[in-house]
């Protein structure tokens, strides 16, 4: 189906996306007036496709996200995937134990002019141990509040795209490249002036220390190592001792990737809540005028 077809643009009212490894006891969870997470019924049109994918795999599927589209959106809708990406991104930002899956959609047609159909593809087997996205009863209200706060986040934001892209990459080095790019973009918007690696680790550690359980010293050491890994990946040459210690040990590499991903997740949240996620000049002024000043004058508060 051509999703620019006028019949689709004016008649399709709902799009539904499967959520892999989403573990929740609720039959239906309404996040806002247009978005709901609900149990997947046996009569779902894409169930036969999913049954084929699930055969012999480790993941499971019980829920889907459904989005109601209103007429003004339909008038200019060219591709429904941003609605899925926005929803998945908010869920990923809410909890570190994300859904390890890569889902892409192409339209197959429509059903009684109500549902825009999509087909699901997995293009790789995700790395590491599966971590189901467990949503406990006590987290429901927190998720609703979080969703309301982040519902207008732009899935095309550069850092969020790199965060998303890093999540779906099948190889460790590719993940680290994307996460490093996101962190450099956020913490070093003035990259043409001064030493990038120094700014990344100092500013990053200072701001990430706002998160209660993240240790500034650990973040500083990790960001320092991350930048050395980044230089090795970009320029090649001999591995430095710190780089080899991470990359040559699969277990340490997985843990390092997981911590790095957390830094990206929290950095995006920090700058989004400051209203600076998409404002590069604003981030530059904030980092130079407040963060750098606080680093030089520790007695001053970061506000």
Image (cartoon, helix red, strand yellow):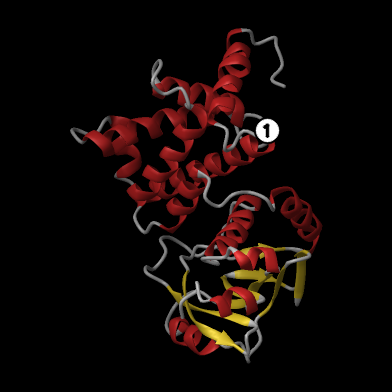
Q: Quadrant of the C terminus?
A: top right
**Residue 39 x, y percent position in the rendering:** 69, 79
**Helix, strand or loop at disc 1?**
loop
Q: Residues within 10 Å of mark 1 (few under 14, many from 20)?
A: few
The quarter of the picture where residue 170 lies is bottom left
Residue beneath the point at 29% across and 37% down: 244
Residue 134, position in %: x, y?
A: 66, 64
Tally the marks: 1
Kindly indicate the quadrant of the structure image that contains residue 61. Answer: bottom right
Q: Identify whether 48 is placed above or below 69.
A: below
Task: Classify residue 8 as left or right of residue 41.
Answer: left
User: Which residue is depicted at the point 26% across and 30% down?
Assistant: 240
Residue 194: tell me if it is visible. yes
Residue 63 visible: no
- Relative to 145, residue 2 above or below: below
Residue 119 position within the rendered picture, expressed as x and y whole percent measured from the top left: 47, 79
> Against 207, is 97 above or below?
below
Q: How far across and down, in percent of the image, does residue 187 sit?
A: 51, 29
Q: Residue at x 41, y 23 (%)?
A: 191
Q: Residue at x 76, y 74 (%)?
A: 28
Q: Which residue is mark 1?
A: 274
Left or right side of 258 for 18: right
Image quadrant assignment for residue 85? bottom right
């Amino acid at each position: 189906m051509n999703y620019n077809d006028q019949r689709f643009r004016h008649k399709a009212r709902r799009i539904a996306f499967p959520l892999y490894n989403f573990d929740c006891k609720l039959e239906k969870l309404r996040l806002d007036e247009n978005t709901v997470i609900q149990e997947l019924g046996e009569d779902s049109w894409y169930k036969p496709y999913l049954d084929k994918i699930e055969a012999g795999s480790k993941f499971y599927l019980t829920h889907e996200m459904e989005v109601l589209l209103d007429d003004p959106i339909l008038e200019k809708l060219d591709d429904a995937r941003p609605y899925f990406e926005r929803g998945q991104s908010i869920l990923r930002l809410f909890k570190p134990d994300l859904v390890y899956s890569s889902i892409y959609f192409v339209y197959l047609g429509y059903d009684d002019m109500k549902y825009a159909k999509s087909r699901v593809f997995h293009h790789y087997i995700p790395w590491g141990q599966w971590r189901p996205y467990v949503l406990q009863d006590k987290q429901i209200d927190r998720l609703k509040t979080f969703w309301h706060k982040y519902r207008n986040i732009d899935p095309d934001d550069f850092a969020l795209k790199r965060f998303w892209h890093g999540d779906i990459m099948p190889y460790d080095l590719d993940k680290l490249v994307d996460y490093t790019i996101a962190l450099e973009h956020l913490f070093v918007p003035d990259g043409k002036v001064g030493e990038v690696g120094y700014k990344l680790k100092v500013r990053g550690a200072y701001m990430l220390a706002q998160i209660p359980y993240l240790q500034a010293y650990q973040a500083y050491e990790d960001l320092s190592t991350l930048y050395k890994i980044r230089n090795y990946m970009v320029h090649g040459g001999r591995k430095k001792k710190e780089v080899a210690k991470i990359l040559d040990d699969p277990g340490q590499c997985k843990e390092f990737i997981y911590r790095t991903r957390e830094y990206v997740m929290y950095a995006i949240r920090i700058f989004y809540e400051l209203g600076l996620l998409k404002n590069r000049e604003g981030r530059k002024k904030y980092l130079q005028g407040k963060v750098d000043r606080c680093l030089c004058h520790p007695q001053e508060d970061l506000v």
